[in-house]
Image: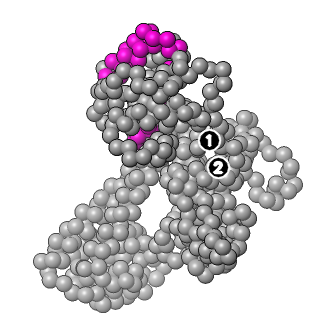
Amino acid sequence: MTCKYNFFKVVMDLSKRLFAGIDVSLKENQLFCMDGDGHPVGKTRKFDNNLPGTAQMVEYLTGLMEGSEFDTLSIGMEATALYWFPLFQTLRTDPRLNALQAHILAMNPKMVQGIRKTYADVDKTDPIDASLIADRLRFGRLPEQRIPDEDLLALQRLTRFRYHLVQHASQLKNYLQSMLFLTFSEWIRTRPFSDLFGATSSRLLKLFTSAQDMQALSLDELKAYLTEFSRNHFSDVEDKAKTVSHAAQDSFAIPKALAQEVHFMVKQTLQELDLLAKHLKRLDKRITKHLAKITQPLTSIRGIGPVLAAGIIAEIGDISRFPGQAQLAKFAGLTWRKHQSGGFNGDITPMTKTGNPYLRYYLIQAAQSMVQHNQEYREYYTRKFKETPRHPQKRALSLTARKLVRLVYAMLSKGQLYQTPDIKATQPTNQEVSSLPLASSVPTQTTEAKSHGIAATRGKTKVKARRLPHAPKNSAKPQEHARGHSAVNT
């Protein structure tokens, strides 16, 4: 969040200011009003969380303002899930409230939790929550609110939906592996295919009920299946057929009735994954099309395509609300707290992860892609990987994402295209975004795409999923950071 504050002027008479706190829920909204001294104004009232209920709320508030000595109105609400947004937009655009010059603020729930701690043994009820919101308004020192434009809000909904689809696909794959161990145990243990859920592997798992059914195939029959399913992709199909055959022969045998039911679940899950992949493909095209409406420099970075750039930009919004790159990193949760007491310094400090999970996800994904396609970041990742033997991949990737935060902040705040260190040394001035074409026209180095593992399609780059150097397969998300090397600030 921003560190700028709107301070009430000293000359302002708070006794003439009406503070209205709204506790938002799915069905109804609780409204509590108080004056500048903290005294309740009227009783707590309920209004339906719909358009007619909001109209009644506005009528009630305007009535309070007209029938009293209040000359200023402040309205606050918690930004709870998505229930608050329609209410906020309706109040913000209401002509009666605009005539009163009402100040409307959507609060981070942490702001309300903070003031709750100042009261001893306060109950957790909707009316009390509304009163705490009103009291937080009365206290002042409120963050400056910046409302993103419609294009950014729409883009944010798309990129967040994509995040949830990717997480759902990951959960399905994890669950599928546990089921597959029953029917194809060696398929999971030895992994005859680099991509367990690739086209060839999936079609074989859909075709054969269990490893025992696959054992009945001759080597030539298995080679024919592999050639057909992979579209003749394997350079040595006979060697691959032997590997798959050995995996089938070495797998555990389970009762046929159980194998049939497990196979049914495996097929259903694989079909759902195929459907999710199609949804993601269509969604990526829509995100790319929407990003074209926004002028931005991030797609000039080799390794960051339209989807990753959209995810980062949609969550950051207006970069000017962050005083520096450290505040942006804190907003993303890419920070590490020190663990020190006396002469003791902790070797392991977990990542805070208290910020925006969507921004953190897209930054880490972008860092992983840049390690593959950007020499500067690949060298940085490798150097951090070698600094410690404990959690090297997670540590190196999270620190690379932290380094990326500094780059993103500099590019967005200065409006500059990305330049490699050697070019930057010879060209002291950078081109500003104000003179750039729209995002869809920003160069993405498609001419060298094939040599760097990027599939160029229709003027954009699609990054192939490849394992990081030195990184183990199926590595976990970055969670910890080993201290002792001043790595965060390098």
Quarter of the image holding residue 335?
A: bottom right
Which of the 4 image quadrants contains residue 293? top right
Query: How would you rate the neighbour count of disc 2 (Cα within 10 Å): few for under 14, some for 14-19, many for 20 or more?
Result: some
429 w.r.t. 389: above or below = above
Whether 224 is among the magenta residues is no
Disc 1: which residue: 2
Q: Quadrant of the C terminus?
A: bottom right
Residue positioned 45% across, 34% down in the render:
133
Specify few, some or many for label 1: CA neighbours under 10 Å numbering under 14, 14-19, or 20 or more. some
In reply to whether residue 78 is colored magenta, the answer given is yes
Query: What span is in magenta?
Result: 53-81
Mark 1: amino acid: Thr
The residue under label 2 is: 327
Q: Residue at x 72, y 63 (%)?
A: 489
Q: Earlier in the sequence, mark 2 or mark 1?
A: 1
Secondary element at tag 2:
helix
Left or right: residue 39 versus residue 251 is right
How does the figure colour the protein chain or chains? one colour
Do the residues under discs 2 and 1 have CB atoms within 8 angstroms? Answer: yes
Q: Is residue 285 in view from this perspective?
A: no
